[in-house]
Amino acid sequence: MHGPDHYFTAHPASADERRTLHVRLAHRDVPVRTAPGIFSPGRLDLGTEILLREVPPAPTAGDLLDLGCGWGPIALTMALQAPEATVWAVDVNSRALDLLAGTAADLNLVGLHAVGPDQVPDVPLTAIWSNPPIRIGKPALHALLRRWLPRLAPDGAAHLVVQRNLGADSLHRWMEQDLGMPVTRVASAKGFRVLQVTHP
């Protein structure tokens, strides 16, 4: 028997029962494709909702990254706000990427690319928005952020949402001390912190 899938499972074993969810993103009612075996398949999760409420509008040009995209609320918001930009939606979960690619096609968001981590070209990232996968554990999370945050463009900014009781404040300190990047807590709501990371 398979155990339950984690949203960071590359190939979920659970039944691929696809359905359409209607969510409000970038001030629009948007139909999105979802299925079991991915992160928060039944709704827009609270952390992502808080992040999307607190981030500044997406930069209108350049390469933007949604790190750990799931079914895609963050990447879709970026692409709806900034149709001229290139949005890289990154996840290890193949089902999540397939669902998001379908939603992007449905909405004709030609600048949105749902890809695995190794498929993003080596370009400076104007913005990184992420509800990072905290539950993969601290070493894996640190490796993930060490890989992506230094790729910010000099004038770019990353915004991460992290639950306070899942280590938001220690992560804040780690990014400043280990990565040497300035971190500002830009919002705190319902047990979540929104952290902004910029270049030294």
Image (cartoon, helix red, strand yellow):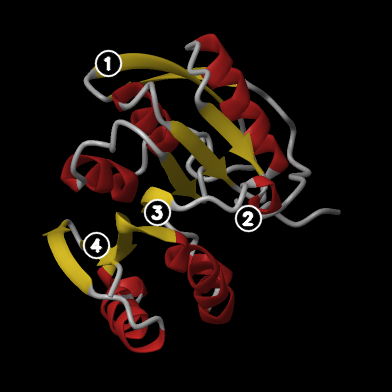
Label 3 sits on residue: 131
Q: In which quarter of the image is the C terminus?
A: bottom left
- Badge 4 amino acid: Gln
Tell which tag, 1 or 4, sits nearer the viewer: 4
Cα distance between the residues tagged 1 and 4: 25 Å
Label 4 sits on residue: 196
Cα distance between the residues tagged 3 and 2: 13 Å
User: In screen coordinates, is 197 left or right of 116?
Assistant: left
Q: How would you rate the neighbour count of disc 3 (Cα within 10 Å): few for under 14, some for 14-19, many for 20 or more?
A: many
- Badge 1 amino acid: Arg
Q: How would you rate the neighbour count of disc 2 (Cα within 10 Å): few for under 14, some for 14-19, many for 20 or more?
A: many
Q: Earlier in the sequence, mark 1 or mark 2?
A: 2
Label 2 sits on residue: 8
- Badge 2 amino acid: Phe
User: In screen coordinates, is 188 left or right of 198?
Assistant: left
Q: Earlier in the sequence, mark 3 or mark 2?
A: 2
User: In screen coordinates, is 192 left or right of 15?
Assistant: left
Residue shown at 59% from the left, 53% from the top: 122
Q: Earlier in the sequence, mark 1 or mark 4?
A: 1
Image quadrant assignment for residue 182:
bottom left
The answer to whether one can see residue 53 in this image is yes
- Furthest-right residue in view? 1
Label 1 sits on residue: 28
Say what secondary structure mark 1 lies in.
strand
Q: Earlier in the sequence, mark 4 or mark 2?
A: 2
Identify whether 84 is placed above or below 128: above
Residue in front for this viewpoint, 178 or 163: 178
